Every structure is written in structure tokens, then in C-alpha cells.
Image (spheres, rainbow, N blue to C red):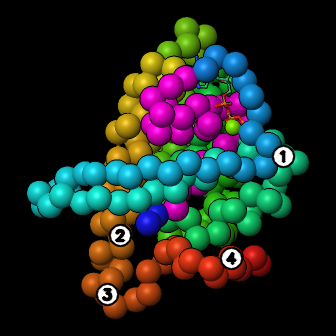
Amino acid sequence: MFKLVALGDGAVGKTSCIKRYTEDSFSERYIMTIGTTFALKTVSLEMPEGREVTARVVLWDLAGQPTYNELRRRYMAGATMAIIVYDVTRPQTFLDIGEWFTRLIAVCPNAVVSVVANKIDRPDRLVPPEAGKMVTKWLDVMHYETSAKTGENVTDLFTDLVQRAIEKQKQTRQSGKKQPGSITPGKPSKIT
Ligand SMILES: Nc1nc2c(ncn2[C@@H]2O[C@H](COP(=O)(O)OP(=O)(O)OP(=O)(O)O)[C@@H](O)[C@H]2O)c(=O)[nH]1
Ligand SMILES: [Mg+2]
């Protein structure tokens, strides 16, 4: 069981990306996430060495509006994977990525992260692909360009994260350390 959290400013498309991935649906209407919601997905994938793996993923969809900052910190605890989403038609959401990354790493230093340029179907795009590549190189994370509307790259984004999380877990086990970010059922998350 792996925990994924979706971060990024309000209305960038976090809920839409999760919905596209888990239900293969999309809605044009904006319904702001209140607090948090979550979805479950069973993922079957082939690892690079050819092994078939099935993983259960809990996708936590955290509201992007600033009023939820404290709640969000609480829900980030124990995440093994994270997506930090921005909207390519709103440059401010791109400029805020660094801050989202800092908040995430403070709570989940071992999470595997992908930065996501969403809404690439829109003709009024303002943030060019090069800008996203530059930032992700600097943060040393993966970069995906997606459209929750058309579904472009959405499955690849999540599959790649799960694959990387499994690889990381394997490496950690081999080095004999306790798994970072693994979910211990029933144990309350530590908030610092
Ligand atoms: N054209 C287009 N619109 C999108 C895309 N993804 C999301 N939207 C629209 O953008 C708006 C916001 O999407 P949400 O998924 O609710 O955004 P959110 O990041 O979950 O927002 P909060 O819950 O407030 O944090 C909605 O009207 C969606 O229909 C996309 O890839 N392309
Ligand atoms: Mg939402």
C-alpha cells in the first residue's frame, strides 16, 4: 500500500488528474475541494526487470486553497509519492512550485516527486515546456506535461511514480533500513 498526495495551487487540476486516472472521467465544472478527499487504485505494472507487480495506492487529494495549509501538512505525513501540479495558463501557479516542494519535503523528505504541467490542451498556454524542465532539473524531480481533459500522459505520470516508489522501497529494504513513508495502519501521523 502506497500513499500519494496531490499538491499545487487551487484550480490547477489536482482533482481532475486523479479523476481521469481512477475513473477515466473529466468535468469542465470547477468544484473546489473542501479539505481533503481520497481515491483508491490497484495498479498492475511491469518493473524494468520484467517482474509483474500489483500495488494498492491511496491517492489523497488535498485542497489547494491557502485556508487549508495546516490540514494539508497533517495529511501529507507518510506519503511515499507526490505530484505538484501547476496550470500552464496561469504563471503564478508555476512560480509557486518551489514553495509546494519545500512544504512537502519538510514533512516527507523521502517521497518520490513529479512536477506536473497540466491543461496543455488549452490554446492560451503561457508557461512554456522549457520553464517546467528547468525547474524540475533544479529540484531533481520528474516532469510531466498532462491534460486531465484529453487524458494525455495522465496514466504514464502515475504509473511512473508507483514504479519509482516500488524501486525506492526495494532499495531501502536492501539497505536494511525501515521503509520511509510506509503507512502503519492505526498509528497516528506525527505532526511537527
Ligand atoms: N482545459 C482543461 N481544463 C482543466 C484541466 N484540468 C482541470 N481543468 C479544469 O480546471 C478547473 C479546476 O480543476 P480541479 O481539478 O477542480 O482543480 P483542483 O486543483 O483540484 O482545485 P482545488 O480543489 O481548489 O485545489 C475545472 O474547471 C476543470 O474542469 C485540463 O487538463 N484541461
Ligand atoms: Mg480539487
Mark 1 is on which residue type?
A: Pro
- Identified at 35% across, 39% down, the residue is 156
Mark 3 is on which residue type?
A: Ser
- Range of magenta residues: 3-26
Sequence-wise first label, 3 or 1: 1
Decide if residue 48 is in sight here. yes
Which residue is denoted by mark 3 in the rendering? 175
Spatial CA distance of label 2 from label 4 is: 21 Å
Which residue is denoted by mark 1 in the rendering? 66
Q: Quadrant of the N terminus?
A: bottom left
The residue lying toward the viewer, choosing from 20 and 121, is 20
What secondary structure is marked by label 1?
A: helix
Residue 131 percent coordinates (x, y): 52, 33
Position of residue 150 relative to residue 11, above or below, is above
- Identified at 36% across, 73% down, the residue is 169
Which residue is denoted by mark 4 in the rendering? 189
Q: Residue furthest top?
A: 123
Which residue is denoted by mark 2 in the rendering? 168
Spatial CA distance of label 2 from label 3 is: 11 Å
Sequence-wise first label, 4 or 3: 3
Quadrant observed for ligand 2 in the rendered image: top right
Spatial CA distance of label 3 from label 1 is: 39 Å
Q: For the residue carrying disc 4, how many other residues have a C-alpha within 10 Å: few (<14), some (14-19), or many (20+)?
A: few
